[in-house]
Structures are given as structure tokens and as C-alpha cells.
Image (cartoon, helix red, strand yellow):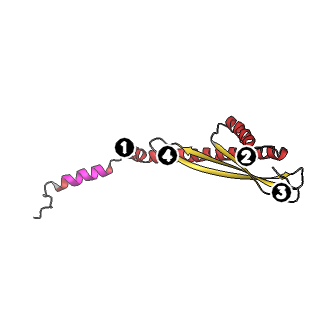
Amino acid sequence: MSDRAIPSAIAPRCKQKASAFAGNTSGGAAIEFALIVPFLIMLLFGIFAFGWSMNSTSSVRYTLEASARSLQLNNTLTQSDIQAIATQKLKALGLQNVNVTIATDPASGGFCMAHVNASYAFVINFPFFSNFPISYSTTVNVPLLSSVKGACP
């Protein structure tokens, strides 16, 4: 008899217990549910956070376009004026720390192009994990008419 052989008197009882255990499914669904739910909750929070970041990006883009329209109507506005307009609109939406910059091309044919750029970092906070920042940047190009030929702000 080898070391691993089960005595013949014990073997039928082991088979009975093993088959009884294999046929018992009570609590199996609860264990599977407990194993899967944390991943499903993280997936749900991830979808929500990503959707919120896309909403914030859309809001920043809309504000940048409104600021660019203000610049188009009054091309004497400075970068600090545009930043103030954008900050005022973004505070109403609950967004902060948006950096707005303006760059203008040289005048050509009585107009020049202004490039209004906004950069924004959206931070996703998950419990028990480190913060995950997502950086966004968007640009709006605006034609500016110059009152004096060859001059642009």
C-alpha cells in the first residue's frame, strides 16, 4: 500500500461527503456577488468620473468660445481681461484653475488671427487610490479686424 492510498473503510465516506459538498450551492451566489461587486462599483465610479471630466472640458471650451467672442467684439482686450471674463463664467459653473492665454499672429490683409488657449487639469479622486489628474487643452482661433491697416493688438 502506498503512502497516499486511502483505506477502503474511509473511501466511501469521503466520496459521500465530497458529493454532498459539490451538490450544495447555498451561498455560492452570495460569494460570487461579493467577489464581483467591488469591480462593478469601481467601473461605475470610473464611468461617472470620466463623464464628469468630459462635462468639465465641454464647459471650459464653451467659456473659451464666449471669451473669444468678447475679444472679437473688442479687440483691445488684454490677456488679463480675457482671463477675468473666463474666470467669471467658470466660477458660475464651479470650475477653477483654468489657465487662459492669447497669442496673435502678425496682421495680414487688414486682419490678424488670435489664438485663445485654455488648459485645465481635472483630478479624479477615488477612495483608497491616489489622485489621477487628466490635463486638457483647447484652442479657439478668432479673426480680428484691425482699425489701422497692419496693426493688431
The amino acid on which the numbered mark 4 sits, given as a three-letter code, is Met
Which residue: 62% across, 41% down? 97
In the rendered structure, the answer to whether residue 106 lies left or right of residue 122 reads right
> Three-letter amino acid code at disc 1?
Gly
Of label 1 and label 2, which has the lower sequence position? 1
Numbered range of the magenta stretch: 13-22
Q: CA distance from mark 4 to mark 3?
A: 52 Å
> Which residue: 68% across, 45% down?
60
CA–CA distance in space, label 4 to label 1:
24 Å
Q: Residue furthest left?
A: 1
Residue 51 position within the rendered picture, expressed as x and y whole percent measured from the top left: 61, 46
- Determine whether the residue tagged by mark 3 lies in a helix, strand or loop: loop
Disc 4 element: helix
Counting from the top left corner in percent of width and height, residue 151 is at 85, 53
The alpha-carbon separation of the residues under discs 3 and 2 comes to: 22 Å
Q: Are marks 3 and 1 in contact (CB under 8 Å)?
A: no
Q: Name the mark nearer the viewer: 4 or 1.
A: 4
Distance between mark 3 and mark 1 Cα atoms: 75 Å
The residue that mark 4 highlights is: 42
In the rendered structure, which amino acid carries the disc numbered 3?
Ala
Q: Amino acid at mark 2?
A: Leu
Query: What distance separates the C-alpha of mark 1 from that of mark 2?
Result: 56 Å
Identify the residue under disc 2: 64
The image shows a total of numbered marks equal to: 4
